Structure formats: C-alpha cells, structure tokens
Image: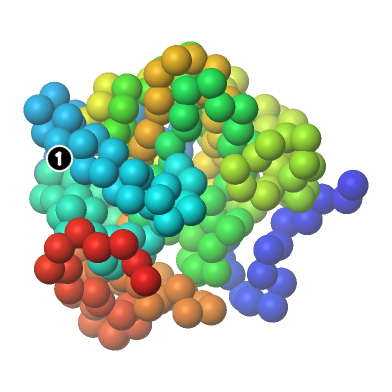
Amino acid sequence: MAGTSNAYPELERDLSFHPASNTDPQKLSRQQIRQFNDRGYISPLDVFSPEEADAHRAFFDGILAAATVRGHNSYSINGWHRTCRSIHDLVTAPRILDYVQDLLGQDLICWGTHYFCKMPGEGKRVSWHQDASYWPLTPARTVTVWLAIDDASEENGAMQVIPGSHLHGQVDYEHSAVEEDNVLNQTVCDPRKYGEAPVALAMRAGQISLHADLLLHGSEPNRSTQRRCGLTMRFVPSDVRAHNGWHKSAIICRGSNPEGHWVHHPRPAGDEMPA
C-alpha cells in the first residue's frame, strides 16, 4: 500500500518542528530544553504526590464506570475538559503549566484532552504515529503532557518514542490494517529509520512526560495484569491556528488569547459527562 503524508490536503499547514528558545527557564533546566529540542521529549517529571495520584485515579475510575454504563469504552473519554471540573483543574494546574510555559511561552491554550486506558490483558496497541498528522492545526507546535494515572511500565504497555524523529517533519504513514488492532488509524512503517532505537517511558502514577507533536511514538498491548491509564493534555501557544472547528473546545490556561481565535470554556460547575 502506498503511503501518504497529508491527512488534510486541502489545508496549508506548517508541519516542521519549531524548537523551544528559552534562555531563562523557570522550571525546566536548560539541559531538559535541549533534550526536548534534540530528542523530542522529556520524561519523567514529578508533579503529584502518591496521595494526589490516588485521588486522580479514583476520579477516573468513577467517570470510566459512568461512561461504560452509557456504552463508551476505556478510550472514549475524549475532550471532557469542557464539562468535567476535575479535568479542567488538571489542565490549569500551575505545577503542570510551569513546565509547559518553559517550552511554549506565557500564553498557553489547552485545546484537547484524552484518557488512554489499556485494560489488563487487552490486545489493542497504538501503532507508530505522529500526533500532528491527525490534527488540522498550524504550525505544528502542540506539546502533549502525558499524566500517568496508573504506573506505566514496559509490561503494561508504556508509551514508546523514537528519539529525534520529530526533526523529519511529517513522514509517510499508511492506514492501519485491521489485524493491527490499533486504537488509532495510522501506522508509520519502519519508524527506526527516522531516529534512535525506541525508548519506553516508564513512569510512576503522578509523573508526567512532555513530547512534541511530530515525535514518532506508540505502545504495545497490555499483556500484564495491571491496568495502564494516562491522560493526555494538549497545549499550544495562542498564535497556533486550528481549522475545521477545532478552535471551539479550548481553555485559556495561562496568559491571554489576544486575537480571540480560541473559544474559551470556563471552569465547569461540576463533573458532568458531555451530552
């Protein structure tokens, strides 16, 4: 099958990596910023205590149970920051934003969130892909925060990355074959030719990783007896533009939205499922 490198051929998008240029970081070290620029990710970073991580896990357990009753699965809790106060409070947590600000600057927009929860013994994988390929945003400057809700290890399907792959811009992918049992629908073949050997990002619950939207990453099935859940939070500076209505689900987390492009959602009154 011939590969493709453009999910939105009708849009003009800048799909090149824009390195962070911060000579006076407040939370990250200069070495960590160099790693993000050179390798495309930083991991792990300590954020929440074990007790706080337990509380975040209990919240997710509750919304997963409610979602399951309504016919959702463990991957369908996507974009709930607009109606769930507890998720809103995570994406606006100063401890998280301090890390992101060192990479993106003082105006921070969260445009998306998504729980990726691999149940014990599950056969689904996330095939090698680049996030930016899926999103009608330009330029490609989204930084993803991946918050470990459960401990993540190679045994239960921790995310793996190809260091340096973000420097190639958008690479060719194929539409995923049914037998892959891919959570998503794109597959980059032979990812190792775009960077170093894969690195598994093992983390304790309450820690985070940061990665660029052009970094090749994926994860193997969870063949263990331990669940593996993470919450992805997607941040951009205010000058990034979203097409196809993707600007309508944002939270202005820090700073301002000077041109008014992003539609801001205020803090919800409670933890409600989307309609």
Q: Is residue 32 left or right of residue 270?
A: right
Q: Is residue 250 left or right of residue 11?
A: left
Measured along the vertical axis of the image, is residue 206 above or below residue 267?
A: above
Q: Is residue 29 left or right of residue 167?
A: left
**Residue 88 location, x and y as percent?**
20, 59
Q: Is residue 79 left or right of residue 219?
A: left
Viewer can see residue 85: yes
**Residue 268 location, x and y as percent?**
17, 68
**Residue 15 location, x and y as percent?**
57, 60
Point out the residue furthest to the bottom here: 259
| Residue at screen point 47% across, 79% down | 245
**Which residue lies under the disc numbered 1?**
27
Viewer can see residue 21: no
Point out the residue furthest to the right here: 1
Q: Foreground: 137 or 102?
A: 137
How is colour applied across the structure in the image? rainbow
Give the crowd class for mark 1: few <14, some 14-19, many >=20 residues within 10 Å: some
Q: Foreground: 77 or 265?
A: 77
Mark 1 belongs to which amino acid?
A: Lys
Residue 241, picture quadrant? bottom left
Badge count? 1
What quarter of the picture does the C terminus occupy? bottom left
| Residue at screen point 24% across, 63% down | 272
| Residue at screen point 50% across, 69% down | 138
Point out the residue furthest to the front here: 69
| Residue at screen point 33% across, 78% down | 262
**Residue 28 location, x and y as percent?**
20, 37
Q: Secondary structure at mark 1?
A: loop
Q: Foreground: 126 or 252?
A: 126
Q: Foreground: 26 or 77?
A: 77
